[in-house]
Image: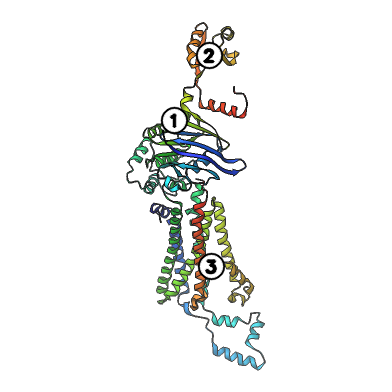
Amino acid sequence: MLSKPLLFQSIKSNWILWLVCSLTMAAMISIINTVLGTQSVTTFRIDALKIFEYTIALARYNLSIKGLIEALGFNPKILDVWLDFNVNDMMDGMYYTVGCMLIPMIYVVITSNKLLVDQVDRGSMAYVLSTPTKRSKVVVTQMFYLIISVLGIFIIQAAAGIISQIIVSKTVDVWRVLLLNFGAAVVTLAIAGICFLGSAYFNYSKYSYAFGGGLCVFFFLAKVLGLFGDPMFATVGLGVESMGYFNYMSILSLLDTKSIAELSFTFIWKFAILLVIAGVTFGMSVYVFNKKDLSL
Amino acid sequence: MTKNVIVVENLTKNYGNGRGIFDVSFEVKEGEIFGFVGTNGSGKTTTIRNIMGFIRPDNGRVLVKDMDSWKDSCEIKRFIGYVPGEIAFPDLQTGREFLHLQAEMLNLKNIDYANTLIKKLQLDASARLKTMSKGTKQKTAIVHALMGDPEILILDEPTTGLDPLMRVTFVDIIKEEKRRGKTIFMSSHIFEEMESTCDRIALIRDGRIVDIADMEKIRNHGIRTYKIAFTTPEEYEKFLTETSFGKKDLKPIYNQLLVDIRIDEINVLFDALKNYSVRFIAENKYTLEQYFAKKFNAAEGTESC
């Protein structure tokens, strides 16, 4: 199924970018863990007794805390949001669905293009295909490299995340870190499948880059815009709830960090959707590449 | 009867706007060097890509050793060495690294022949692929195509970028391959190069085969053309009026003309020339170019000159 010399060639021409991405991700998660340090499990220090006192005091004048918050210009839901707030959950959500996705997306766009369309466009694919190597073997080998290297990036990040957290706060929720990284890896694989399909379909690098890169930029921007619809921001006036619709437009939203934090299992079917996207796009890549004309 | 190694049957690949190849048919026989000439954009590379099974024909087919080149594109590669028209190497460091990797893909255990070729072509295989000159790249591609000792060589403009001395070496290598029984299909837009190497040459223009020439016949063409110059205008005039040879291209200012003569009548010409004062005489070789020019003109219905 795999061509060993081609795999070797792909490793040789792509390992530097992979290493740079992996190390950057490892450094990022380690720095975040260090900065957050021991705050990691604290919530806002809400003093229930004090709130109770204020409530009683305000009630004397037919007023309520809710009214006070409204008078300050905040959405009254803010209390519920704050009570639920957990800095760790928020950081996970921000980091795994937005922050840490940029580098893997860039990696995936560049690498998937280098593995197929660049070689077709430049003509260097001629050398592989002038040997008795089946086209399907070529695509499957390149796909294998892409998938394994993506998984590698997140394995390294997960390891760095676990180790740095142990060093900083002595405790770590290993399963949670693994699930989040697995989820981010699955999102990246779905994106990789889409980019790889573009790389298999197009004959010119520029089109393939525009397709894969354009989609990634769109997914990323939609997710960032979606953040402004997050209750956390919307209630304090930093966003509008309806901006949340942007979340539905981004594949990055299929990593449900909230569900992972609560272990509510909705994240599992979202993973399933991502895996189906990856499976279909990678499968189509093989089909498309086998059938098309190659200008070599 | 020699076998046909490559059979191209009514091959059509239409890229629109009159570009592509149309109803191309020819055979390449076992052990021959088959040339494929044509201007840029005439369809040489498109035909070659079809033979290699890189593109799917709109119509017709190519058989390589009786296998369909599109459907069995992997199997036919066991017998083919290929020099692509555009040389772009994989993202690797040196020429040696590239050749070693290719040897692995070819399942080649013994790279002695590659080393022999490297020596013959004076290739510096340790050079970095990215900084290689065009000629060095071309040599690397040639070594890559030949090192597996394949039965069939398909070479798309293999001498591009080679200096004149290297071209000679290349032609020697190709002739040696032929002696070893290889079937060779090569394209070029340089007529002279093809003349000296090929057994048969197909001319393609605007995607259609104009003619397939047998080099043996062109080399032993029945009519010879001589350019004769006389010492004085009087001698020139005398020759013009007194003799009845087929004369053309008269240039009175130089006292010079061309004479067409059948090969078995050459002595008649020389005998006649004894009576005139000749400044010089030279043979105008009948070239492939002239041959095809004639065919071109005939095809377009104009008088040949």
Say what amino acid the circle numbered 2 marks. Answer: Ile
Circle 3 residues within 10 Å: few <14, some 14–19, many ≥20 = some
Residue B10 sits in quarter: top right
Subunit of label 1: B
Left or right for A59, reference A33: right
| Residue mark closest to the camera, 3 vs 2 | 2
The image shows a total of numbered marks equal to 3
Camera-side residue of A42 and A193: A193
Residue on which disc 3 sits: A98
Position of residue A140 measured from the top left corner of the image (x, y, whole percent): 44, 56
Residue on which disc 1 sits: B197
Left or right for B250, reference B264: right
Residue on which disc 2 sits: B228
Subunit of label 3: A
| Residue mark closest to the camera, 2 vs 1 | 1
Say what amino acid the circle numbered 1 marks. Answer: Thr
Position of residue A56 measured from the top left corner of the image (x, y, whole percent): 61, 93
